Image (spheres, grey):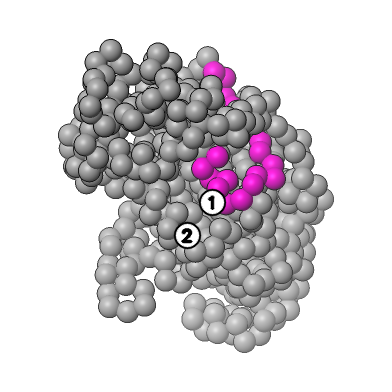
Amino acid sequence: MKIGMMSFAHMHAYSYADSLMKLGNIELVGVFDDDLERGKKVAEKYLTKHFSDQENFLRTEMDAVIICSENTRHKEMVLNAAEAKKHILCEKPIATTIEDAEEMIEACKVNGVILQIAFPVRFSSPIAQLKNLIDNGELGDIVAFRTTNRGQNPGGWFIDKNLSGGGAVLDHTVHMVDIMRWYLGKEITHVDAMVASYFHDIDIDDAGILTLEFENGVIATHDASWSRFAEYPTWGDVTIEVIGTKQTIKVDAYKEHIRMFTSGAKSLSNVFYGNDMDFGLIQDFVECVQKGKEPSITGFDGLKALEVALAAYESSEKNKSINL
Amino acid sequence: MRKIVYKKLEKIDFATTTAKVTIVKSADQLTEGIETFLVDEVNFDSVINDTDKVYIPSTLLNVVNENLYVYYELEQYPFFKKIKEVIVNPKGVLRFRRTGIITENQRLIASDLVVFSAILGEPLTIQVKRTTPAVTPYHTIVTVNFGNGTMAHLEYTFSNDDEKIELEWSGIKQIIEFNSAEMNPFSLKNYTSLPLAYSVDSILATARKADQNVLNRLEEFTSLLSGGVTK
């Protein structure tokens, strides 16, 4: 199977490319990146060809592309790749506006290609185990969720609204909204949020708390931020607590770690040894393409997660509850 | 003047209590000549008089009296005192959570709001979301926008589980984490109520006179919670 990569602007591109290498039966046919220096460097690293022209790249024979550009460029690349009949794995968030996301989904449908959204958290082993427990009725009925996704400020284009479309709330809300929807099988109907910039001297949000309500009355909180600093023992967290009528279970996707103490400014490091969720995502995408299956995480899933993140900004700005 | 303190005895850390305390089962057993009594019951009305100082938790306060003193449970915990001491800038994100068999739940949440407001500023908005009370566990989310630039989720899960408190503070270049289940000095937890225990000294030192202002403050928050204030 032949796969190409479109842009290495998002750091996840490196881990996705590493995953492709690990799979063994994949040929990475090329990398399109109009950041020439970066494009040449990664092409060299992964022993493939660099394309500076998107049209030329998409004319190359390949089954699928992985898009890891700046958020606001997802639309352009998805539309072009769909037109070129390539199956697509697109980094989250799907887009920065609902209209763009809908257009992307429609374009993929019309062109008969898969559009999968990169929500790797679904492939975290403990997160997936909790899904099984819920499906097997071990928690009873779900009453509420408590979730967090807090990390470091990624800097670069992430803090430029013209390229990212939003800060920490956009970056760190979509994953856990996707997991809650996946666990519950229901949609969010009300969003209340407070969004602010606290932790860094930047012109974009770096903190937000969301209070959510699902169509069946389940309530939830979410803490999204870039509040973790370099000296903190770990990059950040991805946690979910599911409060059920039979029992409550909390899962931390990065809990599997060893504590390493060293002399220096960062004395304690939590060294993660759990499963590689990015590899799980890539493996799943490749299988979907090979078997012609419906993607496990659809464009619609990406759209619904985006809807909540955008509603959070609106709620904070208008100081009111947003009904979806 | 005698001091009569009402509290569940399992909450008292006698190792750190230096006040000379006599434990009695009910107000009938109070005797003259002893300074401080600890009473493990909630029926305190009968002992309010002109000569004894009576100390009650804020969750039980519903009258004002010259000799009645009120204390906030959250303020008593050593972990909370330390957190108050180390927060350098009240700007950030607070996540606070209580779990367990919680009685007087509205008053407890109101009491916590009084305590947090004193540190983080007057709330600008308070919003409440609840699950169905008939279903156990019953979960309440209180979303607060504190005046000094703190956004907070205070969450309460009323269930039959053991009592637990979690607090996370994401501040500027400062992260504080507390989880009573993790910070328990005993690995067999049923031998101790630590870290959710406190001294009688702390109660005596932090209690305020139960005047109209204190009662009004609690009533104000209780009423906001009952009404489910929306933005």
| Cα separation between marks 1 and 2 | 9 Å
Pointer 2 residue: B87
Q: Is B170 placed left or right of A323 in the picture?
A: left
Q: Secondary structure at mark 1?
A: helix
Pointer 1 residue: B119
User: Could you tell me which chain the residue with mark 1 belongs to?
Assistant: B
| Residue in view at x 69 percent, y 42 percent | B125
Q: Is A91 placed left or right of B138 in the picture?
A: right
User: Could you tell me which chain the residue with mark 2 belongs to?
Assistant: B
Instruction: Decide if residue A9 is in sight here.
Output: no
Q: Secondary structure at mark 2?
A: loop
**Which quadrant does the C terminus of chain A fall into?**
top right
* Amino acid type at image mark 2: Ile
Instruction: Decide if residue A200 is in sight here.
Output: yes
Q: Is A245 placed left or right of A6 in the picture?
A: left
Q: Tell me the magenta residue range.
A: B114-133
| Residue in view at x 27 percent, y 67 percent | A260
Can residue B93 be found in the magenta stretch? Answer: no
Task: Look at the picture and state if A323 lies above or below A11.
Answer: above
| Residue in view at x 33 percent, y 18 percent | B41
Can residue B130 be found in the magenta stretch? Answer: yes
